[in-house]
Image (cartoon, rainbow, N blue to C red):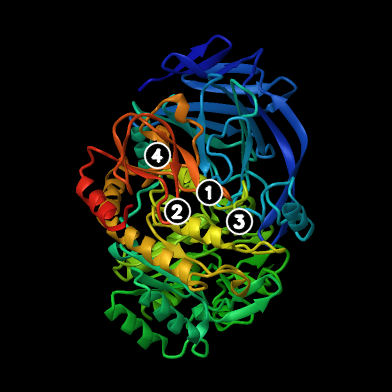
Amino acid sequence: MPFKFIMQSEGFDLLRDDVSVLSHRTGTPAIAVGIGAPILDMVRGNFRIDDVVERSFQLDCFEGTNGTIRLWNAACPEAVVTLDIVQDAQRLVVKLRCSDPSFNRLWLTMQCDPLEAFWGGGEQMSYLRLNGHRFPFWTSEPGVGRDKSTKLTQTMDTEGLAGGDYWTTNYPQPTWVSSRRYAVHLETGAYSVLDLTEQGRVGIECWSANIDVELFDAPSLPKLVTKLSDRFGRQPPLPDWAISGAIVGLKDGADTFGRFETIAASGAAITGLWCEDWVGIRQTSFGKRLFWDWKWNASRYPNLQQRIAELAERGVRFLGYVNPYLAVDGVLYQEALANNYLALRQNSDAPYAVDFGEFDAGVVDFTNPDAANWFADRIIGQEMLDFGLSGWMADFGEYLPTDVRLFDGSDPMEAHNRWPVLWAKVNADAIASRGKTHDATFFMRAGFSGVQAHCPLLWAGDQCVDFTRHDGINTVITAALSSGLLGNAYHHSDLGGYTSLHGVVRTAELMHRWIDLAAFTPVMRSHEGNRPADNLQLDSSPEILAHFARMSQVHAQLAPYVGALCNEAVATGLPLQRPMFLHYEEPEYYNIQDQYLYGAEMIVAPIVEEGKDSRPVVIPDGDWIHLWSGETFDKGTYQIAAPYGQPPVFTRADSAHAALFASIRKAFGA
C-alpha cells in the first residue's frame, strides 16, 4: 500500500507515494480542537447553520510512544487527542480521539498538489470538481434556485430559508476522490466541512472531536471507485422492467387511467405507471401535496387493486409514494402513537410534530428497532407490496429536527445526517421480507455515508423547471456523476423537473430537452411537478407526446446495454453514468460536467442550455460513431447539431454492443 506513516521527533508525516498528504509538527500543527455551540434554524427542511466557537487550541505539544501519538496544547493540557493508525489491504485509518468530552470541534489541515483535482462530496448539484469551494456536509432540502444572486433564490430565502446555495443537497457525504488516485472519507455523522478554497490545502472541520479519517488508494480511478463501493455497499441490479421502458408519472386520480391510455396509444414503450397520489391529495399554497397516511385512498383511485392487476397483464408495473413521516390527522399516526413509535420532544413525552407547510407530521423513530420493523412490515409490506405495488418514491429523510428525543438516546445533531440511511434500510428490509429484492425497487433523493448499501436507485430531487445554472436541468448530470464516484451506481431525474414557483413554468423546449436526456439514463421517469395544472405535461401537445414516444422506444432498445452495465455495477460498483476522466485520466477532462460516459462505450452530451440547437462535444481517444448518422469521430472537440430526438450521442466503434447501436441508428437515425 503506498501510504506510509512516519514518526518524526516533533510530529509525524503521512505520505502517499512519498508525497505528504498530512504533516504535523509542534511548530506547524495540523490539528486543532475546540468547543462550539451550534445555532440552527430549520424551516421545512431548510437550515440556517451558524457556530459560536467558545474555545479553540492548536495542538502544538507532541508525544509518540509505542505507536500511539498524544497531542495537546500547553495552555489546555486536559484536552489530549490520541492518534492511532490502523492499516489493512483496503485502507489506512487515522483514529482521532479527544480525552475531554466537552471538546466538540476538530480542525484538520491536509496537503495536496496545487494542480490536484477533487470530486465527490455526495450528490453535488453545482460543481463536479470541488476545488475552489467550501462544502458543508449536512442533509437538507437543496433549496429553490440555489443561487444567492438571483431574485428567485432571494424570494425563497425571505419566505423561509428556502433559497439554498451551491452546496445545499439532499445527499451530502464527507468523502472525496483525488486525481492522484486516492480518496478520503470522514467516518462521522456530525456536521463537517471540506474547504478547498486555497490551493495546496485541504481544510477539514468537524463538529466532533472523535472521528476516523479513512484513506483509500488504487492504481486507477475505476478501481478506486470499486474500493469505495466495497466500503459503503453495493446495489442489486435494477429490475428488468425498470430499464426496459419508461415510467409515466401521473397524479390525476381516477382520470389518470384515461390519460395513461392516451399516452400508451402514442406508441410509447411504457413499463411503469407511477401515481404518487395513490394515498390522496392535500391542497396547499405550494401546490398539490399528498395525504401522508400511507395506504390506498379508495375515493381517489376506485378499484385500484384490479387496475394494478390489469396493468400487470400488459407488462406495466404500478408505483406509488411513501415517506418516513405520518400526518397527525391520519390513521397510521394513531397506530404509531399507541405503540410509542414516534420521536418525542426533549422536554416532555409528547410526540414531536414537524411543520411541513400547512400540516404537521410525526417522526417515526427508526432508532427504535420495533418502530423500524413496524414501518417496514405494516406500511411498506402490507399497504404497498402486498397490495400490488412494484416500486415507489421513498421521499424525504432530510428533515430530522435537531431537538428531538430519540429512542436510543443518540444526539439528534449526529442522527440527522444518518437518518436517510436508516430510512433506506427500512425500505430495503421491507422488500427483502417479501423476497422481492430483484423485482421491486424504490428511489430516494436523500442520503449520507452508507446509503449505498440499502438504496437501489437515486433520483436528483426537486429541480426547477428551467435551464438555470444551479437548479435547472443541467444539475441532474452533475448529481449523477458526483454521487456515482462514491458507489451509487444508478441515478435518474424527474423528467421535466419538479419545482414551479413564482412564475417559473415548463416550456416546450425544456420538455423536449429533458426527454432527450432521460432516454439516456438508467430509468426514464416523468413527473407532473408540484403544480401540474400550470405546467406542460407529456400529453399537453401532440409534438411533446410524439417525441416522448420516440425516445421511450430508444430507451427500451438500449435495455440490453443498460442491463450489461447493471451487471458490471454489481461486479465492480462502477456507476452507469461516469465522468469522462474516470476512463480518460487527463487534466483536460477534469472539469467536464455537462456530458458523460454511459458505461465505457457511449458518450452522452445532452443540450442543457436554453436556446441552443447544437453544442461542443469532447471526444476522447479512439474511434467514436455518431449514434444517429453513423459518422466517425476521433479525439477532439466538435460542434454537433442536436435537433429534438437526436441529442449528441457517440458509441465506441469497437464496442461489443455495436450491432445494438447500429439497430437504433437504423430505426431512429437520420
Cα separation between marks 1 and 3 = 9 Å
Give the residue type at disc 1.
Val
Residue at point 47%, 81% (across, down): 256
Cα separation between marks 4 and 2 = 27 Å
Mark on residue 608?
A: 1
11 vs 257, nearest the viewer: 257
Question: Which of marks 2 and 4 precedes in the sequence?
Answer: 4
- Farthest front residue in view: 670
Location of mark 3 (residue): 466
Contact, mark 1 vs mark 2 (Cβ under 8 Å): yes
Contact, mark 1 vs mark 3 (Cβ under 8 Å): no
Secondary element type, mark 4: helix
Secondary element type, mark 1: loop
Cα separation between marks 3 and 4 = 34 Å
Q: Position of residue 214 (x, y in %)?
A: 47, 33
Rate crowding at label 4 as few (under 14), some (14 to 19) or many (20 or more) other CA atoms within 10 Å.
many
Is 47 on the left or on the right of 288, as rendered?
Answer: right
Question: Which of marks 2 and 1 precedes in the sequence?
Answer: 2
Give the residue type at disc 4.
Leu
Rate crowding at label 1 as few (under 14), some (14 to 19) or many (20 or more) other CA atoms within 10 Å.
many
